[in-house]
Amino acid sequence: MSPLLGQALAPAHKFLSIIQHNCLGSWNVFLSLFESFREATTYPSIVLLQDPPVNQAHLPSFNGFKSFFPPVRKPRVAAYVHMSFLSNYTVLPKFKGVDDVLALHVSSNEPLFGTAFHSFRVINAYSTNTVDHRVHSVQPEVLFPDLGFPQLVVGDLNIHNPLWDPVRHFSPREISSSTPYFEKAAGSGFALLNPPGQYTRFPLVGKSRPSVLDLAFANTHLLPLVKNWESSLPSTGSDHIPITITLAALSLNQKPPRPRWADTDWETLDPIIKGFKVPAAPSCPTPPRLDEWMSESLNRLVALRKEHTPVSRPSHHSKPWWTPHMTILRREYHNAARAARKHDTPQMREVAGASKAGYFKAIKAPKNKRWSSFLLTATP
């Protein structure tokens, strides 16, 4: 077993790496993906596949992983979970009675990632067009449940929208089929993790242009834990690129307070600095001893200034009910509004209207909750 395979990911660990990839039903793509992990700096704990290779109702195995997939003859989705992860977490697969959706419910006796939550859910989907091209096989209500704990939704959803592919021209049918997914995601508190315009599919043949089909969403409870979304793994031979999503503990994602040097209390600090005495230099100076002597003096001066300097605090413009999810929705709304003003087409106006509705709907609930909490604690 590779040394990386032996690295357990206990609940106390700080990072969690999740991979999503469309295998095109190819065993070669599957093997290429898993072999590429050996060159990575960290080994993934969960690998979520769409269109995995299947032979007589059996999926391939890989050393160190346990597979989960819908109990059907040809599953369209699968999840591979590392054994060290399973030894520290309880992982319960949930099947929706279909072949294209799989949910993993992960739980622990200890709080996860520095939060109060003991569990989170990952949903993996492969949504395809039905006979009616305006309807997809996986509906928005299945992908974006409104639950009160962290959730991650990934998959090849085969929907197109300017929010994740802003430079492409879209047909009215593409807009009308993708808008319900955005509206449901926004209404349930999910934010898109994909950077706008970063392609996830590059056709192997033909004249089709690159597109964004492999999407990832996090709800408001999980969003603060998302450290990054990246596509740094090598090509596997699929026309889809592997995507890595990294979750990190809150303490690692939060930026530390910064001293406001412009507000240093010099009136109090100035006489202290004037009375500061530099320690005597070493009698037999050597480069290491000189470096130690200089560092000690500098650290004492910096510590004195920090004692008389306030740290950064939220400005008076900050809202106590504001969340990172709202920042993303606001950015998406403004992008859609600018695109609608620039192109002024019915479909772009429709996208801008849906984006605006989702943004203001996301604001309404926490704002009302905060106001109700204030009224309960207010005294005459």
Image (spheres, rainbow, N blue to C red):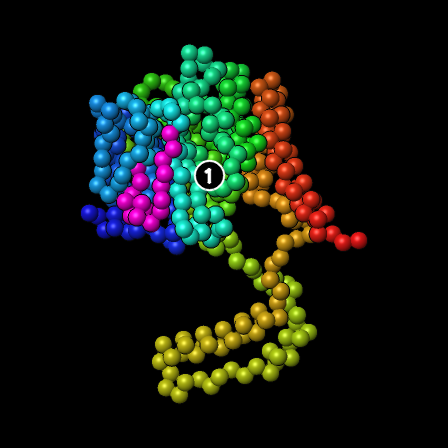
> Where does the image place residue 201, in percent across and percent down from the top left?
37, 27
Q: Is residue 233 visible?
A: no
Determine the residue positioned at 45% across, 14% down: 133
- Magenta-drawn segment: 80-95
Instruction: Name the foreground residue: 283 vs 177.
Output: 177
Q: Residue furthest right?
A: 380
Q: Is residue 292 above or below residue 192?
A: below
Q: Residue furthest left?
A: 1
Label 1: which secondary element: strand
> Where does the image place residue 22, in percent across and percent down from the top left?
33, 29
Q: Is residue 96 visible?
A: yes
Q: Is residue 288 above or below residue 334?
A: below
Q: Is residue 119 above or below residue 99?
A: below
Instruction: Name the foreground residue: 329 vs 219.
Output: 219
> Where does the image place residue 51, in percent across and percent down from the top left?
32, 26
Q: What is the quadrant of residue 368 in the picture? A: top right
> Can you identify the residue that label 1 sits on?
151
Q: Is 271 on the left-hand or right-hand side of 209? A: right
Instruction: Name the foreground residue: 68 vs 260.
Output: 68
Q: Is 195 on the left-hand or right-hand side of 25? A: right
> Where does the image place residue 50, in percent across and percent down from the top left?
34, 28
Determine the residue positioned at 60% across, 21% down: 350
Determine the residue positioned at 60% across, 83% down: 275
Q: Residue type at mark 1? A: Gln
Image label count: 1
